[in-house]
Amino acid sequence: MVKISKRMEGLEESATLAITAKAKEMKFRGMDVIGFGAGEPDFDTPDNIKKAAIEAIDKGKTKYTAVGGIEELKDAIIAKFKRDNNLSYSREEVLVSCGGKHSIFNLFQAFLDEGDEVVIPSPYWVSYPAMVRLSGGTPRIVDTDERTGFKMTAEAFARSITKKTKAVVINSPSNPTGCVYSPDELKAIAEVALKNSVFIISDEIYEKLTYGEVPFISVASISEEVKKNSIVLNGVSKTYSMTGWRIGYAAGPKELIKAMTIIQGQSTSNPASISQWAAVEAMNGPQDTVTKMREVFKKRRGMMVEGLNSITGVKCLLPHGSFYAFANVSGLYGKQFKGKAINTSMDITTYFLEEALVAVVPGDAFGNDRFIRLSYACSEKDIETGIKRMKEALEKLG
C-alpha cells in the first residue's frame, strides 16, 4: 500500500473545482444543471489572442523558453504596470508562471520558513491557507463580515500581528466576496505593514473587473517604500477569459523573484510557449473586449444580487468587483427536508444541487460557513432560471 506524505494531512480538494466537476458530471449524465460555481468568465478568448497563438504555432515558437518567461511578455507586463498602475519594474523584477495560482505557490515556497505566519483576511480564496501550510507556514486568519464590507481594517490587522508574522495577503477585488479596498483603506494597511516589517502580498487577478463604486489601485503604487515591501500577483485568466491558457505573473523585489524563478525551474520550468505569445497580444493588443465583458458582468451582478435578496432568509451585499456574489444563507439554517436538517453551507449547497439542480459553492471553503458563493459568469437566462429554481426548492423546506 502506498503511504502518502504527512504534508497531505488535512489538505483537501479545492471546493470550487470539486463543485464545478460534480456539476459537469451531472450535465454529462443529461441533467440540466445551472452552474453558479465556476470561477471563470463564460466569454470566449478574444479572436486576436487566438490568432496570435496560431501564428506562434505556425512560426515554430513551440520550444522551451527561459524559465521565467519570454522577454516580449515581460516587457508587455512591465508596460501594463506603467500604463495602468504607474508602477515601474525591470525584467529582473518580473516572473511569468503557469497561472496566477502557480505564482502564489512559487511565492510561498520561496518566501516562507517553518512556522512563519501569514495574515489572511476571511473570507479568503480557498487555496491561500492550504498553500501557506504546504510551504511550512501558519495561516493567521482575521475574520471579517458585512459590517466592514468583508474588508480587514488596519486596526484588526495590527491586532493580528505577532513576532512570527512575515506577510499579509490582500486580495482586491476579492474572491469570494467581490469587495474592493479603497485607496485610504490600503494606505492604512500598508502603514501597519511597514511599521511592523510585514511583507504585503497583493493578489490583483480581478483588477479589471470593478464596477465604479470603489476605485481600484494597486497597493504597490502607494509609495516607493510600499512597493519595495510588496509583491503584486496577477494574470490574464480573468481579464481576457484565458483561464485554460495558464499564464500568471508576479512583480516584486528582484531577490524574491530570483528565488521564485529557481523554484519554478525545479518544478514546471517555463509556462507554455504558445500561451506566452498569446498573452503578449492580450496585454499589448486592443482592450475593448475587456470593457464589453465588464459591462455585461455589471448587468448580471444586479440581476443576481436582486434575485438573491428576493429570497426569504437570504441576504447579499452588492459586490464591487470580480464576478461573485457572497450570500448570507444562515437565515435558512434549522429548516428541514425529509427529516434532515440544514445547518451548514455544505448542507444548503448539497440541497440546491440535488433538489434545484443549481451548483453553488459552500462558504466554509472560504472560511465562513454562514454563506455561499455564486458566480454570475453565466447567461442572464441562467441567472433568472437558477434563482427561480432555488426559490421553488426552498418552498419545500419545513
Image: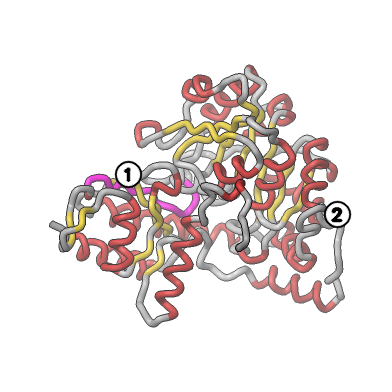
Whether 52 is among the magenta residues is: no
- Which amino acid lies under the numbered mark 1 shown in the image of this protein? Arg
Q: Which mark is residue 71?
A: 2
Q: Left or right: 78 with respect to 212?
A: right
Q: Disc 2 to disc 1, how far (Cα)?
A: 46 Å
| In front of the other: 309 or 212 | 309
| Residue found 43% across the figure and 45% down from its top | 177
- Which amino acid lies under the numbered mark 2 shown in the image of this protein? Glu
| In front of the other: 309 or 391 | 391
The image quadrant that residue 110 belongs to is top right
The x and y percentages for residue 266 are 81, 53
**Residue with the most extreme top position:** 195
The quarter of the rendered structure image containing the C terminus is bottom left
| In front of the other: 50 or 109 | 109
The x and y percentages for residue 364 are 40, 47
Q: Residues within 10 Å of mark 1 (few under 14, many from 20)?
A: many
Q: Residues within 10 Å of mark 2 (few under 14, many from 20)?
A: some
Whether 327 is among the magenta residues is: yes
Q: Left or right: 230 with respect to 392?
A: right
The image quadrant that residue 336 belongs to is bottom left
